[in-house]
Amino acid sequence: MAAVTAVAAWLRLDDLGRPGRKVFDEIYYASDGCWYSGIDYQDCGLDQDVERSWVHPPLGKVLIAAGIDAFGNRPFGWRVSAALAGTLTVALAGVLAFLLFGSWIWAGVGALLVGSEHLLFVQSRISMLDVFLAMFVVAGFMFLVWDRVRRDRERHDEVVEHTPAVDGEDPWLDAPPEEHTEPVRAFRPRPLRLLAGASMGAATAVKWSGLFALAGAVLLSLWWESRRGRRPGVSRLPARLGSAIVALGFSALVVYVASWAPWLPDRGGDLAELASHHVDMAEYHRELDTVNDDGEPAHPYMSRAWEWPLMLRPVAYHWEGDAATGQEILAIGNPVIVWGGFLVLPFVVAGAVRRRDWRGSAIAVPILVQYLPWLAVTRPLFLFYLTPVTPFLALALTAAARSVSAMKLGTRRLVAPAALIVVLGVLAFAFFWPVLTANTLSLDDWRARIWFSSWV
C-alpha cells in the first residue's frame, strides 16, 4: 500500500506545472487561492479585490493558498495542494479498505484502483475544489468505519469475557454477531466518531455538497447503533442514537464555522454579515439556470446526473491542437472502475440488506447518498461532481474482485478473473493517461481514446 501511495504521489506531482496557464475553473480557484495567500489581486488575475468564487466556502481555497505560499504564484504552486490531497485520498482509501476487508493485500488493491481512477486523478492535478472534498469525505468514512471496527473488537472481548462457552463453542465466532448479548457499560468517549464528523464538516467547508456525505455518515451510525440496540441486554437505544447524531453533527458544525475564520477579519468579524453571505450563496445556487437569457445552454459541458454512470458527457479542461497533433485534459472516469463500480453496486446493496453485511453498507451508502440527491437538482451539473463518489466505486469493485477470488470452480479459486478486474482498471488508466495529462498525441491516437462523439 505504501508503494501504491508513493507511485500515486509521483504520478500526480510529475510535470505538474504543465499546462503553464490557468485552465477551466482554475480562473476561479487558483486566482482566489492566490488572493487568500495575500498577493495583490491584480497579480492573481482578479478584476477586483474580492474573491471570484464567493459562492463556495473558503476551506478549499485556503488549502490552495497554502501551496501558493510554499511554491509561489505559478502553476505548480496553484496545483500542489490538490496533488497532495489526491495522494492522501489514495492512502486513506487504502486504510479504509484494510478496515473493511482485514487484509493488506486487498487494502493495496483498493488503493491501486482508487489511484487509477481518472476523475480523481485529473482533479488531483488541477487547482479546483473537488479533490479536497473527496479527501475529507474518504477520511470521514474511514474514521467512522474505524470506530465501528474498534467498538466491535471491544464488544468481542467483553462477550468472550462475560458469556460462558456452551459445549466448547466460541460464543463470539460460532454465533451470528447480531444475536450476541452486549454487556451494558458506562459511557466511553469515541474520538474516532468525532474525527469522522470533523472530516465531514471540513468537506462541507469545501463545498456544500459535503452535507450529502455527512447525512450518509449519520445514517450509517444510526443503522449500526439500531442493529446493536436489537440485541438482548442492550439498553438506552434512544441515547445511543442521539449520541451518534450529536457527535457527528456537533464536530462537523464546529469545523465548518471555524473554516470561516480567514473570511471574517476583512469584515470586522461581523457574524450578521456572515449569515447574510450564506443567504446570498444559497440564492445563487438556487437561481442558477441551465440556459442563458438567449435560450442557449449555460455551459457546453453540462450533463444530467442520470448520465454520470454512463459517462455520456465528460469535461474538457484543456485542449491545444493543430491538423496533426493535440493535447487534452479530459475529466472523465475510468471506464472499468466507474462502469464496473455502478454495475456491482446492486450486489453490494443486496449484501448489505439481505445478509446484514455492515461492510457492504459502508461502501454502498457513501455512493448512494452522494449520487442520488443530484438526480433532483435542476441547476447546471458536471461529471466531475462525481469525484467524491469514485473512491467508493473503486472499493465496490475491490469488494467484487475479492468475492470472485473466494469462489471456487471445482477445487480452484477464481483468482485469475479477480486479478483480471484489477489489471483492466490499471490498463485503462495507462491507456487514457495521455488525455488526462495533456500529453501530445497524433489525432488518430487521440480519436482512439474518444470512444463516443459526446466525449468531444
Image: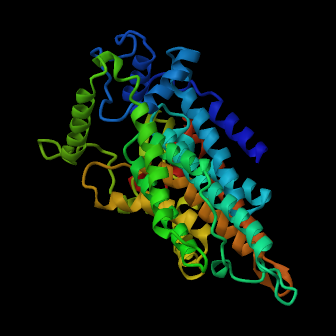
Q: How is the image coloured?
A: rainbow
Extreme residue in the front direction: 186
Q: Position of residue 277 (x, y in %)?
A: 24, 32
Residue at the image position 23 percent from the left and 29 percent from the top: 272
Camera sees residue 372: yes
Residue at the image position 76 percent from the left and 74 percent from the top: 162
Residue 419 vertical placement versus 124 (above, below): below
Q: Position of residue 452 (x, y in %)?
A: 44, 57
Residue 159 vertical placement versus 280 (above, below): below
Residue at the image position 64 percent from the left and 30 percent from the top: 13
Find residue 129 and report its image quarter: top left
Residue 319 vertical placement versus 386 (above, below): above
Of residues 76 and 443, which is closer to you in this image?
A: 76
Q: Position of residue 250 (x, y in %)?
A: 44, 46
Extreme residue in the left direction: 294
Residue at the image position 69 percent from the left and 51 percent from the top: 95
Camera sees residue 427: no
Q: Position of residue 337 (x, y in %)?
A: 58, 59
Of residues 85 and 145, which is closer to you in this image?
A: 145
Of residues 441 and 162, which is closer to you in this image?
A: 162
